[in-house]
Amino acid sequence: EVVLTQSPGTLSLSPGERATLSCRASQSVTSSYLAWYQQKPGQAPRLLIYGASSRATGIPDRFSGSGSGTDFTLTISRLEPEDFAVYYCQQYGSSPWTFGQGTKVEIK
Amino acid sequence: QVQLVQSGAEVKKPGASVKVSCKASGYTFTGYYMHWVRQAPGQGLEWMGGINPNTGGTNYGQKFQGRVTMTRDTSISTAYMELSRLRSDDTAVYYCARETGIAPADIWGQGTMVTVSS
């Protein structure tokens, strides 16, 4: 199965700053079937990005995804107060679906 | 609006089974694959498997083979996930999530907390 490793584990930033989250796969992700989710405490995950770089419906354009093969990045251009949460990457190109362990973006 | 509504929290003893339901509304139930994902307390997300609501065909994660059964009732637009021989480490929030074929899990249920305790 494809193992996804996210870094850093925790990112301490201030509102207005830029956040860069990394996701590295143990093997090439089929057809860039890589997604990013945001999860807040007590809530279900919310799809942000799919296909490595396509924003899901209703997602603000401050969220962007990039990458291919084994290296992917989620960028939040300017952090809003509501963006502090845990972010997961996921590959859905091969079975089983697998998720990274998560990156927590916390207020500095 | 498009939504998935799951059944309520469950408390089970080790060795028992649990069946979680996921009722879809606002879209054609049989047109979209349904996945099940779980999250242990304070932990990450773990994919369990999925079902094609149109055909009933399933794809289970190897870790859950032999213990999980996913079914659906198209007459009431509801998917089910049953997990048997429960252990304490099955304590988790269980989510259903819809796949569109282009995007993976775009709509999620609210989650069902399953606690396994003697």
Image (spheres, coloured by chain):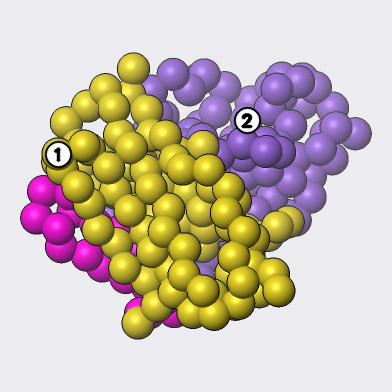
Q: Chain letter for purple, please.
A: A
Few, some or many C-alpha atoms within 10 Å of disc 2 (few <14, some 14-19, many ≥20)?
many
Q: Is residue B50 magenta?
A: yes
Find disc 1 in the rendering and name its residue: B75
Looking at the picture, which amino acid does disc 1 mark?
Ser
Choose top left, top right, bottom left or bottom right for residue A16. top right
| Image mark for residue A76 | 2
Q: Which residues are magenta?
A: B49-65
The residue lying toward the viewer, choosing from B79 and A107, is B79
CA distance for labels 2 and 1: 42 Å
Nearest the eye: B73 or B24: B73
Q: Which residue type does callout 2 highlight?
A: Ile
Report in which chain the residue with disc 2 lies.
Answer: A
Residue in view at x 52 percent, y 58 percent: B38
At which x and y percent is residue A73? 55, 46
Q: Is residue A33 magenta?
A: no
Q: Is residue B61 left or right of residue B43?
A: left
| Position above or below: B16 against B23 | below
Give the residue at x 60% y 77%.
B14
**On the rendered structure, is B32 left or right of B110?**
left
Tell me the crowding category of disc 1: few under 14, some 14 to 19, or many 20 or more residues within 10 angstroms, Cα based. few
Q: On the picture, is B7 further left or further right than B10? A: left
Residue at screen point 46% across, 43% down: B7
Point out the image quarter for the C terminus of chain A: top right
Q: Which residue does the image show at 27% across and 42% down from the upper left? A: B78
**Is label 1 in a helix, a strand or a loop?**
helix
The chain coloured yellow is B
Image position of B32 (left or right of A58):
left
Element on which disc 2 rests: strand
The answer to which of A85 and A23 lies nearer the viewer is A85
